Amino acid sequence: MSPSYVSTTTTSTITTASPQTLEIDAIDDAASYVPVISSLSSVYSASALPAQEGRWASLVACFKQFYPAEDLTFIARSPGRVNLIGEHIDYSLFDVLPMAITQDVLIAVHVGDTDGKLVLNNTDPHFPSRTFNVADLKDIEIDATVHEWSNYFLAGVKGAFSLLPSAEIPSMHCVIDGRIPTGAGLSSSSAFVCASLLAIATAVKAAASPSSTTFANAVTKSDLVQSAIVSERHVGVNSGGMDQSASVFGVPGHALRVQFYPQLKASPVAFQSDDFAFVIANTLVVADKHVTGPIHYNLRVVETTVAAEILAKQCGLGPLPIRDGFGGTLRGVVEAFKARGVDMTGVMDKVKQVFSKQEGYTLAETAELLGQSELEITKKYMTRFPVRFERFQFRARALHVLDEARRVEKFCELLAHAPADRSGDDAEEKYLQDLASIMTASHKSCRALFDCSCEELDELVGLAVANGAYGSRLTGAGWGGATVSLVRKDKANDFVQCLKEEYYSKRYPGISEDKMNDAICITEPGLGSAVVVGNYSA
Ligand code: ATP
Ligand code: GLA
Ligand code: MG
């Protein structure tokens, strides 16, 4: 029997400092520093390498155009991720199973003591040039009410100062090249924030040791993840920790089981069969979480958090540990019930009892259940991240979270065993069907209980299953963005072709082959964050 996750990339402990707060202490060793790499063949798989070499060469050329007189000191890189199972449960502190993907954000940096400026240029002309005085960065305010691309870099600045409070950021002249489609559920935002934070920590190190050419040990993976999780919220989205964990801890050829409780931990999960693959298909409906946060993402965080607080109050569980200064979690509720001998099915029954009103709860009804005033509730949960709602859907949201947490457990249990361990001629077929049925159930729950799907996602999921996928589901936040489908490897190319014809050509008549190739791909789990120093080729 093989273990479900074979080794531990990094471990940080979350200690209960008081009944109300969770503190995260990092325990790191030298092995868990973000790697500094000198060859692209250590970053990408052999199949991805040729295209990446061309792309890195273009970035280096673009850097020279922006800054003709300056040396390129290093390139910081952080990838996007695809989540296989465990949607919208990271901020309730339940385990999730994402993997890092090839598509990434690169930040090419010149470090100097020249002009006291942080200059941000982007290879994508949609993101105009921005300049800041480095002397102003320490106290810089991020205006979360505007959707501004450089806010994500400034979130990295905030994270860097929380890690290195006395750091002096040197002049940095940067070119950003992101290849993760934005708002596609593949976490371009966290890749950008992690790459920014990594770029700043590396620049600080480079400025401190100008003669060095390696800049090794600038930041540990664990510190990078934890700072990026907290600092990304400065852009105005109350996000969890899955995306940053996947982006930084990614291990080639493996998914990652990310745990948030009782300690932040990312464990590589090997696939026990070579016969299946995951295909990512982007609906091309952009899900802009910053813009829709008040009615979508941030509202779901409030609904799940307040649901947990109400359950604790109504069931006499006592105060729940608070996640990142925001509120209690459903994981806290499950642990409190577990200590009283109540299992997950029992907790789901309690949810149905406490939240018997299927139509949802007004703020006044919520205040009554919580024993707090409407003003208090608004101040605590809806001020930093404002939301708009008529009724909170506590019952449906909590039931999704608890059942999805069970699906992650079941999926990981299945992955722990090779299909060949099963008996019968159709062992592998049955194995893939079992994995896939968990994915499909997850999509149904996202659609019906968590209400984070959309017409295009549902259509793509339906077409995927009709065209040979064992199972399919939305991935990432939803409300647009991408699906992930489980297919047989030997059928994957045909499957991609079918979706091009059935979805892209029909929904977007005249769409170019290049656009379709960007939108749908057979994915492979890749390496997490890295700093690359050298000649930027294989
Ligand atoms: P999800 O969070 O659902 O996985 P996502 O991270 O792609 O998807 P958002 O969290 O809404 O979506 O973040 C997208 C925003 O991140 C963009 O609107 C843009 O402001 C910023 N961003 C991402 N990549 C880049 C880039 N290469 N250059 C500039 N800004 C970027
Ligand atoms: C976004 C957030 C993550 C997670 C997913 C949904 O990607 O950034 O923290 O909540 O949505 O699973
Ligand atoms: Mg994001």
Image (tube, grey):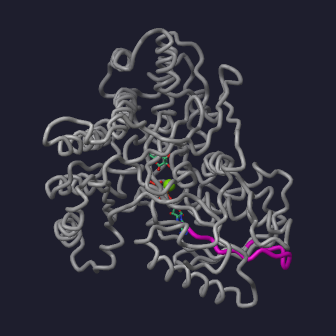
Q: Main secondary structure of the magenta part?
A: strand
- Give residue 427's position: percent from left, percent from top: 18, 41
Lateral position of residue 37 relative to residue 522, left or right: right
Residue at screen point 46% across, 65% down? 102
User: Nearest the camera: 261 or 282?
Assistant: 261
Picture coordinates of residue 371, whole percent (x, y): 54, 16
Q: Is residue 191 visible?
A: yes
Q: Is residue 178 left or right of residue 121?
A: left
Relative placement, left or right, of 150 versus 183 is right
Can residue 130 be seen from the camera position used here? no
**Residue depicted at 34% across the width and 33% down the height:** 410
Image-based side of 109 in relation to 436, left or right:
right
Quarter of the image where the N terminus is located: top left
Give the image location of residue 89, x and y in percent. Answer: 45, 37
Question: Residue 325 at x, y = what percent?
Answer: 65, 34
Q: Quadrant of the C terminus?
A: bottom right
Q: Is residue 283 magenta?
A: no
Between 485 and 367, the residue placed more toward the observer is 485
Tally of marks: 0
In the depicted structure, whether residue 348 falls above or below residue 204: above
Residue situated in front as seen by the camera: 432 or 16: 432
Task: Reply above or below: 478 against 182.
Answer: above
Residue 457, image quadrant: bottom left
* Residue numbers of the magenta segment: 105-118
| Magenta region includes residue 115 | yes
